[in-house]
Amino acid sequence: MPALRLIARDTPYHDDEFGLRARLRGASAESLIERYNVSIGCTAWVRARGLYLIALREALLATGLDCSAFIDETGMRLNTPVRLVGDRLVPGR
């Protein structure tokens, strides 16, 4: 199952080296959901994509929506699209 697994919190990324956190901060929930759904099925993996997905995970959690269907304390699953239902992000389009 494709997934993003978090690494130690003391990695250099946590300084927002590429400004990804700043770019995603304040984005609408709909925009973040669209960005997440576009990531589904992509099997390419480079450092920049990993950093982007970490920033996207943090931004999704910051919305205050219930993301427990695909995000937990260890990472974020990338195996199915999500949609907004009330205040929850649930699998499906």
Image: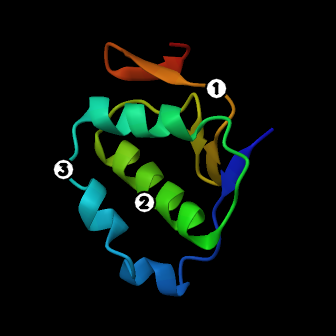
> Could you say where residue 17 lies in the image, as x and y percent from the top left?
39, 82
Instruction: Please identify the quarter of the rendering in which residue 71 is found.
Output: top right
Say which amino acid is labelled 3: Gly
Element under label 1? loop
Q: Residues within 10 Å of mark 3 (few under 14, many from 20)?
A: few
Taking the image as shown, residue 17 lies to the left or right of residue 90, namely left
Q: Residue at (69%, 60%) from the top-left corner? A: 45
- The quadrant the N terminus occupies is top right
> Could you say where residue 51 lies in the image, as x and y percent from the top left?
52, 67
Give the label on residue 49, or none: none
The residue that label 1 is drawn on is 80
Say which amino acid is labelled 1: Thr
- In this rendering, the answer to whether 29 lies above or below 46 is above
Residue found at the very far left of the displayed protein: 26
The residue that label 3 is drawn on is 26
Taking the image as shown, residue 70 lies to the left or right of residue 2, namely left
Element under label 2? helix
The residue that label 2 is drawn on is 55
Say which amino acid is labelled 2: Ala
Q: Residues within 10 Å of mark 2 (few under 14, many from 20)?
A: many
Q: How is the image coloured?
A: rainbow
Q: Residue at (38%, 83%) from the top-left corner? A: 15
Distance from Cα at disc 3 to Cα at disc 1: 24 Å
